[in-house]
Image: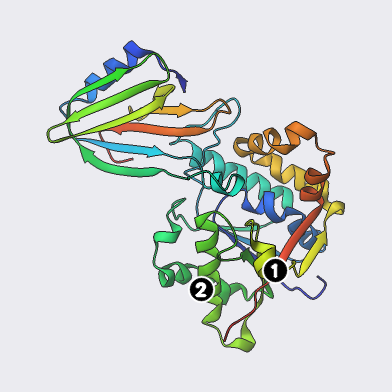
Amino acid sequence: MEKEKHVLVIFPHPDDEAFGISGTIAMYTQNNIPVSYVCCTLGEMGRNMGNPPFANRETLPQIRKRELEESCKVLGINDLRLLGLRDKTLEFEDLDHLADYFSPIIDEIKPSLIITFYPGYSVHPDHDACGAAVIHAVKRLPKEERPAIHCVAFSNNCVDELGPPHITRDVSKYAETKLKAIQAHKSQFGAFVRGRAAKHGLQDKQVQERINTERFWIYKWDD
Amino acid sequence: MQPIDPNAVQQALDQFSNKDVYIHLETTNGAYASHYNADFHNAGAFIRNAQIRYSRGKLTGGGPYRVGLKLESGWVYAEGLTDWEIDEKSRLLLAGHNREGKLAVALQLSEKPF
């Protein structure tokens, strides 16, 4: 961790940062390592409208934008960039076109580490497409100039095919911040609470593991 | 949004008839359905800002409701609708939420592009 100069997080949806890796983000920012977050869409197609519902299909994007800004505040992210792409359409975009969004940002920030989704192992088509385009953008750089890429993966076959995660990080020290970031996404938070946490409580072993442990695979170049 | 008031929604559907209007129509199980249940066949469809013109729009069912729009040479329909709203831009928003409050279907009409 100490060696990172600047961490760039690239995900497609507001709340991917919170549910997925907010312990890790808090670890960096609380150790004075700047974190930039590129969020491709506003999660326009989300099914969760709050519980009871307070959003509709047309108001959801602006609500989620505000939730994202709140989450970034909680996590100490001072550089949030929204790309204005549309939820659930990333996989239908041209790969080069998507990568063209990322390349200038990577050139500008020169991150020592990029965090994104592992293409093919991240369940949601936007996750896979986002990860693939990030890899594509970084691959344009000469090999010695490429930042490390830590990928999030959670498909049912990810451990079978990728092997155990290269990094299993205990983020229990940042659990409180992580929960606050998750709660900032009020319209989406209900899904989390109504899931396993509702049935088994926050002390449930699986729920605790999800809160306290974050797993990453280091992307290995094939060239 | 409010639970569907059949008479009010029927009135709104009548007001959008015989005009060129923009439609948003979607159905979804969410992107995670097959992840949580491998036997589940995930399916959905989405269209936004296609222009249509219908001669008759009709709400039926006892709740959840169905809406059918009769076009000059075709049809549009949606089922599972539970809630409605005319928003501040005078657009008709219809949605179907499941018991957990998750959106499962949406049918929306507007005189201007969404």
Residue A158 higher or lower than A197, as above or below: below
- Front residue (pair B98, A113): B98
User: Is A90 placed left or right of B57 in the picture?
Assistant: right
Q: Chain of mark 2?
A: A
Q: Position of residue B91 (x, y in %)?
A: 33, 29
Which residue in the protein does label 1 denote? A217
Place of residue A186 in the rendered image (x, y in percent of width and height, measured from the top left): 64, 36
Residue A76 position within the rendered picture, expressed as x and y whole percent measured from the top left: 73, 54
Number of numbered discs: 2
Label ID, residue A104: 2
Q: Is residue A67 left or right of residue B74?
A: right
Helix, strand or loop under label 1: strand
Residue type highlighted by circle 2: Pro
Give the numbered dot on residue A103. Answer: none
Name the colour scheme. Answer: rainbow
Q: Residue at x 33, y 44 (%)?
A: B47
Looking at the image, residue A164 sits to the left or right of residue A130; the answer is right
Residue B93 seen by the camera: no
